[in-house]
Image: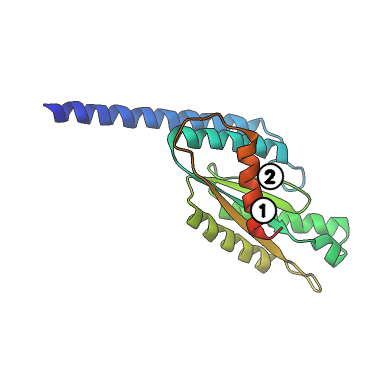
Amino acid sequence: MWYFTWILGLLLACSLGIINVLRLEAQETWDKEHIFLDPLTQLMTRDTMLGRLMEKVENSKRNGFPFSILFISLKDMKARNNLPTFEMDAILHSVADCFKEDIRAGVDIAARMGEQDFLIAMPGSPLKKAEQIAAQIKNEILDRVKAPGLIVEVATGVAEYSPPPEESATTTNEVDELIRIAMAKSGI
């Protein structure tokens, strides 16, 4: 008889999990319709991404699943290549297109963090998976962004957020530290 109670409890837990996932998906859909995008790349802005990372940390603490971030930088490309603004804009647009093809639509989020810096948050992706995506994106950028005399150097760094065992409030320091780790791993 106890196993019926156990099965019923398991079904209830699963249905509550599904309801929570649907609620989060609805929230993300609403957020997508009401977010600020970088006009050039059509990726999130830095401020929007920092807010979303705070949400991802909260979600990670609530559900116990880690997530990873990927930092990508085009190292001093404009200065090294003496590019006019319109060419640099075309390159940045091409780089953003690489992200859009390699990340999971509706799950991963990408943002332009600086003139030549980008960040991708990958909920539910362990560090190993994020490292594979980083290598894939780096290779794709190097393959796609080509022109005579153009030197492209891409630096990538990956960091994983694992929720602490105890409940605690999310702070901007956690998000800043996560980004700092990813940037450090990229060599920037």
Q: Nearer the viewer, residue 13 or 99?
A: 13
Residue drawn at point x = 14 percent, y = 27 percent: 2
Q: Position of residue 16 (x, y in %)?
A: 37, 27
Q: Residues within 10 Å of mark 1 (few under 14, many from 20)?
A: many
Quadrant position of the N terminus in the picture: top left
Above or below — where is 111 with respect to 9? Answer: below
Q: Which residue is mark 2?
A: 43
Identity, as a three-letter code, of the amino acid under mark 1: Met
Residue at 62% in and 66% down: 139
**Tag 1 residue:** 183
State the residue in front, 78 or 158. 158
Give the image's coloring scheme: rainbow
Check disc 2 and give the amino acid type: Leu
Q: Label 2 neighbourhood size at 10 Å, few (<14), some (14-19), many (20+)?
A: many
Is residue 37 something one can see in this rendering? no
Dividing the picture into quarters, in which one does residue 165 lie?
top left
**Picture coordinates of residue 177, whole percent (x, y):** 63, 44
Residue at 50% x, 31% y is: 24
